[in-house]
Amino acid sequence: MIHVRDLKKTYGAFEAVKGVSLDVAPGQIHGFLGPNGAGKTTTIRMIAGLLKPTAGTVTIDGHDTRVAPEAAKAALGFIPDRPYLYEKLTAREFLAFHGGLFGMSDAEVDHRSDELLGLFELTRWGGELVESFSHGMKQRLVMCAAFLHRPRAVLVDEPMVGLDPRGALLIKDVFRAMAKKGVAILMSTHTLEVAQEMCDAISIILGGEIIARGTVAELQAQAGTADGQLTPVFLKLTGGRGFQEIDDAV
Ligand SMILES: Nc1ncnc2c1ncn2[C@@H]1O[C@H](COP(=O)(O)OP(=O)(O)OP(=O)(O)O)[C@@H](O)[C@H]1O
Ligand SMILES: [Mg+2]
């Protein structure tokens, strides 16, 4: 569903993404992990068609984003790390605007808005201006917008940031239900417990390159860690600081 081949992005002499390839099949949740500045957001924005790759190809639901950007975008739902919302619109107006971009009829938008505002517990805020929303409410509204047109592939950059425990749990359940229905999900996250719990496969990016890929068990084997948690695996593969170094610096 999501096919990425040898994707590159350079800024001047700096190579932010150095040839990333990955595939997410229908019904799969693929975790995209890596330290700050590793190239996750840059990669995701290129897949979403918001940032022009220096090289490489992206195919969404069979549509090459360079050849058929509109068809690729129609199959895609994107939840950015720092969502941009029109503060002077109400939640429902924002969804109507978003639905319009995807060619949805007013009736379809109304129906889906009812469904999704209900799911994300925003029904009573539907008529309120976005500027009055808390951070977590904005996050949930962005998710309503991303799912409005029933995308076949979903890209999500840090879904759990700013969500309360109940909201985070809801998102996990929503992603699981979508995957069950055949949606392909690519999710960047620093919440490793979430990645461990939800992802069918994980790619770890470091310095713009994929350095490890596989199921949690495969990554554990690669890191040679017996521990059941993903955090020591991640630190081993990406190089965490030792305590002595921290102790010296503070
Ligand atoms: N417009 C830009 N111009 C120059 N460098 C950029 C630009 N955008 C991103 N970079 C650089 O590319 C690298 C990758 O950034 P990116 O935002 O993709 O990281 P990330 O993995 O999403 O990190 P985080 O976990 O902090 O979100 C960083 O070194 C960043 O400084
Ligand atoms: Mg990022």
Image (tube, rainbow, N blue to C red):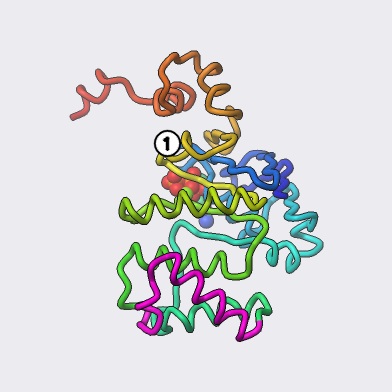
x 49%, y 76%: residue: 114
Asked whether 236 or 193 is in front, the reply is: 193
**Residue 47 in picture, x, y percent from top left:** 65, 53
Q: Which residues are magenta?
A: 105-130
Q: Is residue 167 left or right of residue 33?
A: left
Q: Is residue 27 left or right of residue 232?
A: right
Magenta stretch holds residue 107: yes
**Residue 237 in picture, x, y percent from top left:** 49, 24
Magenta stretch holds residue 26: no
Amino acid type, mark 1: Leu
Toward which corner of the image does residue 149 lie, by quadrant? bottom right
Main SS of the magenta part reads helix
Toward which corner of the image does residue 74 lie, by quadrant? bottom right
Name the residue that disc number 1 marks: 192
Image: 117 above or below 97: above
Q: Judging from the image, what secondary structure is the residue with disc 1 in?
A: helix
Image: 233 above or below 46: above
Image: 245 above or below 181: above
